[in-house]
Amino acid sequence: VQCNAIVCPTQFKTQRYCDMLRELCPEMENASPGQIKSSRLPDLHTVIVTDSHLPGSFNLKDLMQAGTNHHIQLLQALQKKLVCDDPINIQFTSGTTGKPKGATLSHHNIVNNAHFVGMRIGFNWRKNVRICLPVPLYHCFGSVGGGMIMALYGATVVFPSTGYDGRANLSAIEKEKCNFVYGTPTMFIDMLGQPDLAQFDLSSIVGGIAAGSPCPPEVIRKVIDVMGAKEIL
């Protein structure tokens, strides 16, 4: 997709992102930050690392602190030129419900989707919505159904863990008094299968969303009966 910039941590679990980048783009080692010129990745010029200082890359914290009034003015000027049908996101689908592809989404597409998901579940009339969000932010379920809904409806979104952890979800629901929980069918099956499930206080749960792939009816029944998510969609 001709990306100009990449934002990443040094590594996450077994994925060593910066090592992968250096292998793909050895020119990074001797480049100034923002000035990468790669024969293999001709469009890439900027790498932003979230947790360390590496050759050829910006550190995220340093970058955030470098902002000035001039940059704010540039941003405001850019905002005036935006049209709601402009593309804003190329979302790589995982292939759970079709062939994997890069789907181009517009501002309108994303805001409209979040608007109607929130309306359907009743976030427009509920007070103090607190969502337990274990689904990944690199898909629409997390980024639009979670992040954008938070912005549109003023909901609180709770991230239980940096990577999926069924027990962390239950703990987050209990400690943060989440009243909605999102998940794929396999995530709900995993939560229901936790050996100490009965020890968690899930009485705050009102509903949630199961998505990403078709959910067996018996799993939905258990989510309703055991977890108390009477308004699961």
Image (cartoon, grey):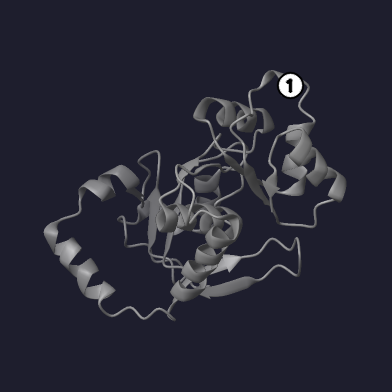
The residue drawn where x is 50% and y is 65% is 115
Q: Nearer the viewer, residue 182 or 116?
A: 116
Mark 1 sits on what residue? Answer: 198
Residue 41 in sight here: no
Q: Position of residue 229 (x, y in %)?
A: 68, 41
Please state the total of marks drawn on the protein image.
1
| 138 in relation to 192, above or below | below
Q: Nearer the viewer, residue 195 or 33?
A: 195
The residue drawn where x is 52% and y is 39% is 159
Q: Position of residue 10 (x, y in %)?
A: 48, 41
Residue 73 in sight here: yes
The residue drawn where x is 71% and y is 67% is 100
Determine whether, in the image, residue 98 is placed left or right of residue 231: right
The residue drawn where x is 36% and y is 51% is 57
Estimate how packed mark 1 is, as few (under 14), some (14 to 19) or many (20 or more) residues with alpha carbons within 10 Å: few
**Mark 1 secondary-structure assignment:** helix
Q: Position of residue 6 (x, y in %)?
A: 44, 58
Q: Quadrant of the C terminus?
A: bottom right
Determine whether, in the image, residue 220 is placed left or right of residue 89: right
Q: Position of residue 21 (x, y in %)?
A: 51, 53
| 130 in relation to 5, above or below | above
Spot the residue most to the front: 125
The three-letter amino acid code for the residue at tag 1 is Ala
Q: Nearer the viewer, residue 222 or 24?
A: 222
| 171 in relation to 2, above or below | above
Spot the residue most to the left: 69
Residue 86, picture quadrant: bottom left
| 177 in relation to 88, above or below | above
